[in-house]
Image (cartoon, rainbow, N blue to C red):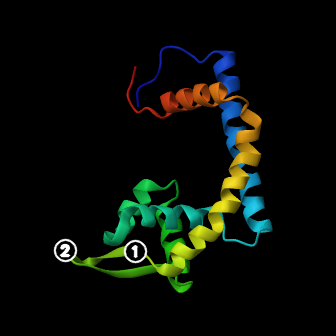
Amino acid sequence: MVASRELPSEGVIKVWARLLRAQRVALTGVEADLKTAGVPPLAWYDVLFELKKAGEGGLRPVELEGRLLLEQHNISRLVDRLVVAGHVHRRPCPTDRRGQVLTLTETGRKILRTMWPVYAGAIQRHVGSKIGTDEDVRALSLLLERLMSTRER
């Protein structure tokens, strides 16, 4: 691990703390809205959406893990629940007999369509309505993109 020669400024430390708190507040609000609407939690949506994007070819669990912000053991349990609920189909991988491929079922597509209006409204309520103008949205998006960059400057 490479140590930085500079310590963060007080302003950067404040940004760091606010970024973490903002994420927690927004996620808590979104999850509460989903629960109030009687739809599954956000993690379900994220898995189902990634499988929808993957199309008929599906994804191997390790590929799904790379696309989500969940630990492997959490993904395994979540996938098990989605299979039992009939939203995800698990089949053997054609190129690796030990592997599996996950695909979205029609029931999974239906739950995605049911969840999206609730999720979209929650995003607007807990994030969009608090940011401000379209210019503010673009500026914040660019700053967050810089934070997600893996390149060293």
Count of numbered badges drawn on the protein:
2
Residue 76 appears left or right of 100: right
**Which image quadrant is residue 95 in?**
bottom left
**Residue 122 horizontal/vertical position (percent):** 72, 53
**Residue name at image x 40 percent, y 74 percent:** 103
Answer yes or no: is residue 27 visible: no
Answer yes or no: is residue 43 visible: yes
Q: The N terminus lies in which quarter of the figure? A: top left
- Residue 141 vs residue 106, the one in the foreground: 106
Dot 2 amino acid type: Thr
Q: Which residue is mark 1?
A: 103
Q: CA distance from mark 2 to mark 1?
A: 16 Å
**Residue name at image x 56 percent, y 79 percent:** 81
Q: Which residue is mark 2?
A: 95
Badge 1 crowding class, 10 Å Cα cut-off, few under 14, some 14 to 19, many 20 or more, is: many
**Residue 128 horizontal/vertical position (percent):** 70, 40
Residue 5 appears left or right of 129: left
Judged from the image, the secondary structure of the residue bearing numbered disc 2 is: loop
Relative to 28, say whether 51 is above or below: below
**Residue 30 horizontal/vertical position (percent):** 72, 55
Q: The C terminus lies in which quarter of the figure? A: top left
**Residue name at image x 54 percent, y 72 percent:** 78
